[in-house]
Amino acid sequence: MANPYAGEVALVIDGTRHVLKLTLGALAELEAGLEADSLVALIKRFEDGGFSSRDVLALIVAGLRGGGWSGTADDLLSADIEGGPVGAAHAAAELLTRAFLSAQSA
């Protein structure tokens, strides 16, 4: 079960439920992989609706890795994500929100 107070988000991929979490290592990998000026810039892209499918995929991969998954983005290219692209985008946005809300409340 995903714990929203710990910044976790659940996502079903290929029929298997995964728990995603943005750890510090996952955030660093995400920032480097997206070549974002900062995580604040990435958050702003989601807030403004200017995010790309690449942003969503990178966030999902980072969250999966933070949750203990050892796959790569290539593993998700043909995966069936519950809710499709909209479900993936929602999970990515929720992941960002929970990561920084839990950090502020700690």
Image (cartoon, rainbow, N blue to C red):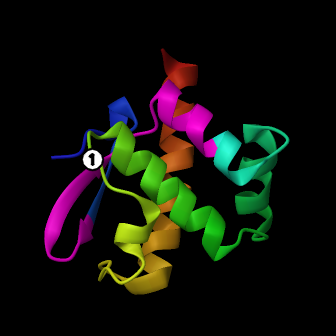
Of residues 15 and 87, the one drawn nearer to the viewer in this rendering:
15
The residue lying at 65 percent from left, 49 percent from top is: 33
* As drawn, 18 above or below 87: above
Instruction: Specify whether residue 14 is painted magenta.
Output: yes
Q: Is residue 15 magenta?
A: yes
Left or right of 55? Residue 26 is left
Could you say which is closer to the camera, residue 2 or residue 14? 14
Which residue has dot 1 on it? 69
Q: Residue at left 68%, top 41%?
A: 31
As rendered, which of 57 and 6 lies closer to the eye?
Answer: 57
Q: Which residues are magenta?
A: 12-30
Is the residue 77 above or below the residue 69 in the image? below
Element at label 1: loop
- Percent from the top left, x then y, of residue 6? 34, 30
**Residue 27 located left or right of residue 8:** right
The residue type indicated by label 1 comes to: Trp
> In the image, what residue occupies the spot 44% across and 55% down?
61
**Which image quadrant is residue 17 in?**
bottom left
Bin the neighbour count of mark 1 within 10 Å (Cα to Cα): few under 14, some 14-19, many 20 and up.
Answer: some
Expressed as whole percent of the image width and height from the top left, the position of residue 48 reads 80, 64
Determine whether 39 is above or below 13 in the image: above
